[in-house]
Image (spheres, rainbow, N blue to C red):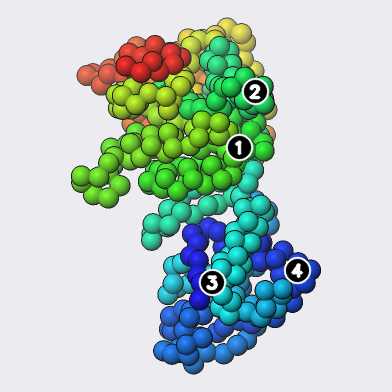
Amino acid sequence: MVSRSLPTFEHVNLQTAIEVWVGRPGRSVTLRGVVAPPHFGPVSLQQLVAAQGIPPIRLAAPPLVDLPNGPDSTLACLLSAVLLVEDARGRYVVMVTGPSEHNPGLAVEVAGLGVARAQSVLVELDALRRELNVYRGHVLDVSVSPMGGVVLAFAKPAHLHRDDVVLPDAVLTRIERHTLGIADHRDALLAAGQHLKRGLLLYGPPGTGKTHTMRYLLGRMTGYTRLVLTGQALHAIGSVADLARDLQPAVVVLEDVDLVAEDRSFGPGSSPVLFDLLDAMDGAAADADLLFILTTNRADLLEPALAARPGRVDVAVHIDLPDARARGTLFDLYARGITTDLSDTDREAIVQRTEGVTASFLKEFLRRAVLESIVEAAEDVEGAEPAAVTAAHANRALDDLLSDSQEVTRSLLGVGNDPTLLPPGGGAGALPPRRHRGFGWTAYAPFSGG
Ligand SMILES: Nc1ncnc2c1ncn2[C@@H]1O[C@H](COP(=O)(O)OP(=O)(O)OP(=O)(O)O)[C@@H](O)[C@H]1O
Ligand SMILES: [Mg+2]
């Protein structure tokens, strides 16, 4: 009896591999489901062969579980089945046991062959799983199950255009060069003896577009396996980095790293998650086409660890609050598709009044302005079509968002409560200083190692 246990996210790959393997010339296979009454644990092939301690099982049509094998497709996968095989090796049995209520694992067992031949069956299935891996080239959201296993969910890449990302051109170009540029010129770089593995850190205040920029990059990196880890999923970085290596070229996104950086994987005394991240980034071979993107608004928390172990992150880019020009562009971007009746002077006034706010604040501001215009139109004549957004609507929306009573709202939109932003007459009181500004890093400076 030779068995192999696999992570549960491999279930769909195992099924894909089995379907191809079963159809290979010279092989005939009879499939039977192994069904036990409810409340009995899983039955292993070992138990079946030894005929000991088994529940009253029946051979029946195989139970199947329908699992995603792409963003828009699923594959019915065997849950508890035996394959009675006859091929050049002889006659033997392969059993597949998928995860179920009583059994969190996925296992393949082979009986009826010598050990080496049984192993060769597993090797064939491994090779097919790797070759036909359904996750390759897709965007995948990584999460962790309550049992601690890695769960992969297909996601759809965002279709963001370069113009949708409002950043100073030099900043965006720098980010693109380090991510897309290396991808485009991988062969030339390898020929010149240069490594492809790279790490990019995007840091800056909340709501300035770190996640937005990352989504834009992922959308452009078609052909790459793109694994996105947030929150608790960052604890699974070890297995995810292995997966990324198998499925390269790959991108591993570590979102809001600061949130777990100081967590310890296995209680006090073990290493902080941040160190696991750095280890994983270091573990990959230098010529692997792997890109790590880290985002954070607490670069101050990460910098000492990154500086102490140089070479993992080679470019750090500061994404700052939008300046006047960027605010104008953001305004135009979010005003696309909205009917406005605003003069250049009105637009300029809005840009001036929103000094210090984030992109997400501007987005919310426009939504409120549109709402103002809809409410006003409906108040005049019920059911009336909203007229264009005027300066009066915009100012009312802005007055409200910037008023004293909206301190928490502003904070949620990532804006510091800067007294100079408040409308005339809005008593500022003792307002907290603006959060997360300026980390004392040189923007765009590569880590130097000390
Ligand atoms: N530079 C930008 N250009 C265009 N839109 C932006 C930009 N920044 C933010 N936005 C808009 O604001 C929303 C929120 O921004 P995003 O989630 O990218 O912020 P973040 O920097 O990741 O913040 P956090 O630190 O809280 O994670 C985005 O979905 C996008 O619509
Ligand atoms: Mg974010």
Spot the residue most to the top.
345
Q: Is residue 407 left or right of residue 281?
A: left
Quarter of the figure with the C terminus: top left
Q: Is residue 25 left or right of residue 158?
A: right
**Looking at the image, residue 434 lies above or below residue 373:** above
- Kindly state the secondary structure of the residue where label 2 is placed: helix
Which of the two labelled residues, at mark 4 and mark 2, occupies the earlier sequence position?
4
Disc 1 designates what residue? 249
Q: Nearer the viewer, mark 3 or mark 1?
A: 3
Tell me the mark number nearer the camera, choosing from 3 and 4. 3
- Say the numbered circle drawn on residue 23: 4
Label 4: few (<14), some or many (≥20) within 10 Å? few
Q: Is mark 4 within 8 Å of ligand 2?
A: no
Residue type at mark 1 is Pro
Percent coordinates x, y for residue 91 in the rendering = 66, 80
Q: Is residue 202 visible?
A: no
Frontmost of labels 2 and 1 is 2
Per the image, the residue denoted by label 3 is 115
3 or 4: tag closer to the N-terminus? 4
The residue sitting at 64% across, 43% down in the picture is: 137
| Image depth: mark 3 or mark 2 in front | 3
* Residue 196 coordinates in the image, percent (x, y): 56, 27
Q: CA distance from mark 3 to mark 2?
A: 43 Å
